[in-house]
Image (cartoon, rainbow, N blue to C red):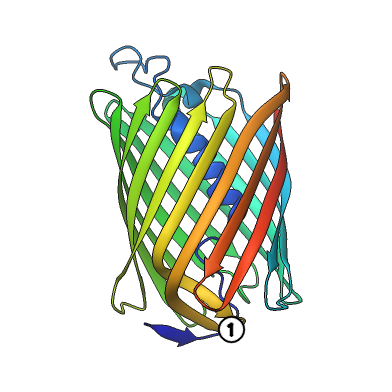
């Protein structure tokens, strides 16, 4: 087990708004949509031709063993550019252990006939416990018969440590359902790599309403107290969804339960409002 002592480091799952919104969007990336100029018909995912939107919300985690609660507020803006890609910017204000940090970031997705590439990054204004910088490169490839594959590389730089995460996964579309599995390898400052597993089931309706279940288990970098980052055994279950009470108004929600080794458990949720522009 690799342990690094430093000042306030976040866990693998603490970027709640970005990870949840990413899970909502990934299923749409590989669904066929209008054609890109110069490409065969129905090769561009429909999300690139959708309307822009703004989303804002709140998340909270309740920790066991008398640990202080975590909470955050976020805002996210998505700007589809049709054949020129998809640009998303976001910001978050995070409160933990009596401290407040802010982070801003952006991601850019570009469609190819064989898949979608995504570049993303974020920076923390005063990184007491958030990563100073976080950069990622993702590829979502298409295969015949509703199959696909994913490859992800991410690096997070903290004040006193660096985390590298690599992921390789497969997915299957069957009607309105998406099934996915990914293996994740992570390390702290190039220590021994640890393995985790993520499984996901999503239901995606024709009206773009969504329900999903994500389960993660394995070893990953986690904060076990306010000063220590460690690779520990983790189990994590999340339920999430997107519904449309009105034509241009969406409600996003999530609930999760995590067990962080023998250190603590946490129960949390997220609620957000999406306005289509």
The N terminus lies in which quarter of the figure?
A: bottom left
Asked if residue 218 can be seen in this view, the reply is yes
Residue 96 x %, y %: 70, 71
Pick the front one: 266 or 155: 266
Identity of the residue drawn at 64% across and 45% down: 254
Task: Give the residue number, with chain letter if any, for mark 1.
Answer: 7
Residue at (43%, 75%) from the top-left corner?
232
Residue at the farthest left position: 144
Q: Is residue 43 left or right of residue 253?
A: left
Residue reaching furthest to the top: 41
Can residue 277 be seen here? The reply is: no
Q: Is residue 41 above or below residue 203?
A: above
Give percent across and percent down for residue 120: 46, 50
Viewer-closest of 148 and 163: 148
| Percent coordinates x, y for residue 95 in the rendering | 73, 67
The picture places residue 158, in percent across and down from the top left corner, at 50, 75
* The image quarter in which residue 16 lies: bottom right
**What is the quadrant of residue 161 in the picture?**
bottom left
Residue depicted at x 63% and y 77%:
128
In this view, the residue in front, 86 or 267, is 267
Disc 1, SS: loop
């Amino acid at each position: 087990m690799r342990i690094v002592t430093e000042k306030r480091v976040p866990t693998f799952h603490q970027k709640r708004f970005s990870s949840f919104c990413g899970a909502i969007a990934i299923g749409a990336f590989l669904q066929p949509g209008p054609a890109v100029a110069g490409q065969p018909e129905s090769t561009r995912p429909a999300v690139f031709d959708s309307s822009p939107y703004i989303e804002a919300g709140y998340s909270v985690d309740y920790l066991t063993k008398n640990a202080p609660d975590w909470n955050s507020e976020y805002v996210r803006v998505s700007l589809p550019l049709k054949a020129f890609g998809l640009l998303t910017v976001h910001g978050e204000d995070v409160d933990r252990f009596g401290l407040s940090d802010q982070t801003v970031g952006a991601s850019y997705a570009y469609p190819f006939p064989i898949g979608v590439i995504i570049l993303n990054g974020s920076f923390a204004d005063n990184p007491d416990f958030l990563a100073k910088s976080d950069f990622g490169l993702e590829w979502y490839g298409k295969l015949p018969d509703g199959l696909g594959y994913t490859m992800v590389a991410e690096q997070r730089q903290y004040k006193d440590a660096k985390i590298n995460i690599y992921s390789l996964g497969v997915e299957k579309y069957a009607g309105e359902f998406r099934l996915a599995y990914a293996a994740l390898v992570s390390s702290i400052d190039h220590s021994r790599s640890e393995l985790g597993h993520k499984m996901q089931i999503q239901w995606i309706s024709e009206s773009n309403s969504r329900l999903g279940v994500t389960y993660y288990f394995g070893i990953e970098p986690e904060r076990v107290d306010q000063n220590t980052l460690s690779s520990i055994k983790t189990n994590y279950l999340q339920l999430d969804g997107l519904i449309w009470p009105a034509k241009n108004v969406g409600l996003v929600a999530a609930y999760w339960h995590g067990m962080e080794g023998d250190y603590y458990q946490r129960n949390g949720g997220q609620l957000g409002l999406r306005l289509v522009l």
